[in-house]
Image (tube, rainbow, N blue to C red):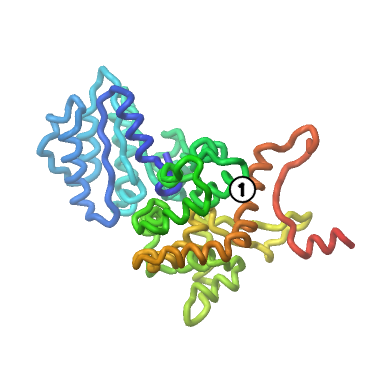
Amino acid sequence: MTGRRRVGKSRLVQEFCDRSGLPYVVFQATRGRNAVAERADFASTLAHSPLPGAELVAGLQASDWNQALRSLAVATPDDVPSIAVLDEVPWLVEQDGEFEGALQTVWDRHLSAKPVLLILVGSDMSVMEALQSYGRPFFGRAAKMTVQPLHLADVQAMTGLDAAESVDALLITGGFPEIVQSWRPGMGRRDFLREAVSNPLAPLLVAGELSLLGEFPEASHSRAILEAVGSGERTFSTIAAQAGGAGALPSGTLSPLLNTLLAKRVLAADLPLSVKADSKNKRYRIADPYLRFWLAFLQRGIPLIERGRGDLALERIERSWTTWRGRAVEPVVRESLLRLLPDERWPQTEAAAHWGPEDLVRAWR
């Protein structure tokens, strides 16, 4: 199970476990923790879980992940269904290069013969997808589920707004459940923002920083690139100049970082719709609307909000709202068209994209 950070994966899994009525264990990894300490925490979590065989593994000290995961097989019953959840799997892979192979071995030899549902959860989409790629130990051993943010109809149902206002709400919240839940039904955009910027702990403000810190430290080049794109830079050269600080980032540094951010689904790249490939006019953007809004307005406004001047932060948003919304809504419209088309009116539609200025000139000529 994968999806953007803070989209609600862990909460969804917890609800599923609670409603199932089955014995289960949920272990959540910690980023940067020593692998020995992580295995000790895993053993403790397992020993205190409601799995029937938990007492059999109490006090276990595993020297590697093979032993630790075999203790999971001991704790799970042979005759009744159970659930085992490993959350933040990419961090486990990052901590110990042997974890992935150990998981495959224990699954094949022990867990696969039991009525146990093993759920692997992670926010790093590139790592989660790589786990199932050809040549990797877990290839062909799992079904994939991607948890998406709430779509426009969900946002409208939860906020009670009309169509146009619901689009605004989607652009601001990104469809992230915890933020949409903080939007009181019937509340207009400006009222919601005024209430949010008056509270430094509002979900609208906090979720963005927590999401970025979970994957990108503040001092990293990746964070600088995201901030450059979030501030409005869209081309390779302008991103390099903005993210480099005193000097532009070299192409050899920027290119792999951009590719990594695209693979993680944090960035998206748009190409003009043309009969000829036009990679020179590639335009980068933040993939999800909420993070795009947070980087454009809220990140700079947090110091003002923390000292009680949320009104100034709100004024900044209002000054640029119309221009920002005009560009931010384009991907939402394109994605909506792709879900609706082709239809009887446009039976051969296969793509929905933008035309660059050069394409418009050629078409006019």
Q: Residue at the spot x=68%, y=64% of the render?
A: 281
| Residue that sits furthest to the right in the current view | 365
Residue 12: percent from left, percent from top: 38, 35
**Residue 257 appears in view:** no
Residue 61: percent from left, percent from top: 13, 43
Left or right for 272, reference 299: right
| Residue that sits furthest to the top in the current view | 79
Residue 328: percent from left, percent from top: 60, 56
| Foreground pick, 73 / 278 | 278
Would you place residue 130 above or below residue 212 in this image? above
Q: Residue at the spot x=47%, y=78% of the render?
A: 245
| Quadrant hosting residue 364 | bottom right
Residue type, mark 1 in image: Val
| Residue that sits furthest to the bottom in the current view | 246
What count of labels does the image hold? 1
Residue that carries the numbered disc 1 in the rendered image: 332
Q: Residue at the spot x=70%, y=51% of the render?
A: 353
Residue 64: percent from left, percent from top: 21, 46
Would you place residue 303 above or below residue 88 in this image? below
Determine the secondary structure under disc 1: helix
